[in-house]
Image: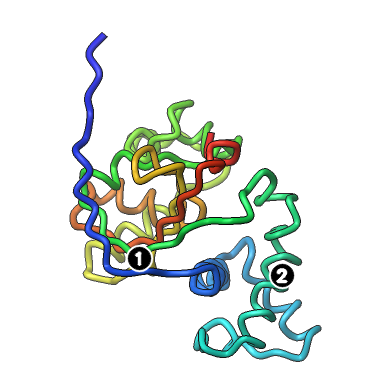
């Protein structure tokens, strides 16, 4: 069997941290039709405005703690549950730019919808092919992917993807699946800015 290896040419922009990841994650989900409403409701309940997410001050320890608590409440971050079940407590975060070829190798998380959309491969290129063919995962419409891909081809810039793995190879998408699918539908037209989290124990989550 022929195995193809992609040479890692990831360009590291600098060191990141948990606070930036949490802010980036919440920023991505705030605009989500599925998750945005819950985030807004919880912001109101704790007396915060959307600016906690849309204008994050990473030097403000109190604001960082509030965002972390919000991600814990909405997605189980730091509590070993829901999306973050088996997610390691200690992760090294970096800001990086991935080439189009590297982004094409990123896999979806091991979640039933993304497995179904990609035909079992968890590869965004396979999902894009099925979307073009009119295949729906669990009968969920694909229009959001098509809309995002059109925005990308018009020159719109997306927020960074959040990717994780044991190292910089075999990365799995933690946040940004819609955007990742849009890149695939558009043919991976450019390099992509990402936050990349690595940990020796990440394999328990990024299967």
- Crowdedness near tag 1: few (<14), some (14–19) or many (≥20) residues, C-alpha within 10 Å: many
Residue 127 figure quarter: top left
User: Can you identify the residue that label 1 sits on?
Assistant: 95
Name the foreground residue: 15 vs 176.
Answer: 15
What's the mark number on residue 79? Answer: none
Q: Is residue 110 left or right of residue 164?
A: right
User: Can you identify the residue that label 2 sits on?
Assistant: 38
- Residue under the point 45% across and 44% down: 165
Q: Could you tell me residue 2's position as x and y percent? A: 22, 13
- Residue under the point 44% across and 61% down: 93
Q: Could you tell me residue 32's position as x and y percent? A: 55, 65
Q: Is residue 77 left or right of residue 187?
A: right
Q: Could you tell me residue 84's position as x and y percent? A: 66, 51
Residue 62 figure quarter: bottom right
Q: Secondary structure at mark 1?
A: strand
Q: Could you tell me residue 89's position as x and y percent? A: 63, 55
């Amino acid at each position: 069997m022929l195995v193809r290896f992609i040479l890692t040419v990831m360009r590291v922009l600098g060191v990141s941290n948990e606070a930036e990841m949490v802010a980036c994650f919440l920023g991505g989900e705030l605009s989500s039709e599925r998750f945005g409403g819950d985030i807004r409701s919880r912001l109101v309940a704790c007396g915060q405005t959307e600016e906690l997410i849309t204008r994050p001050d990473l030097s403000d320890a109190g604001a960082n703690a509030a965002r972390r608590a919000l991600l814990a409440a909405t997605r189980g971050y730091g509590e070993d549950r829901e999306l973050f079940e088996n997610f390691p407590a200690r992760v090294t975060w970096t800001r990086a730019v991935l080439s189009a070829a590297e982004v094409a190798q990123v896999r979806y998380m091991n979640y039933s919808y993304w497995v179904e959309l990609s035909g079992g491969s968890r590869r965004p290129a396979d999902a894009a092919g099925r979307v073009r063919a009119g295949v729906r995962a669990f009968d969920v419409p694909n229009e959001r992917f098509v809309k995002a891909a059109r925005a990308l081809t018009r020159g719109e810039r997306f927020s960074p993807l959040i990717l994780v793995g044991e190292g910089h190879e075999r990365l799995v998408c933690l946040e940004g699946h819609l955007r990742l699918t849009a890149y695939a539908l558009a043919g991976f037209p450019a390099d992509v800015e990402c936050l990349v989290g690595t940990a020796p124990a990440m394999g328990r989550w990024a299967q």
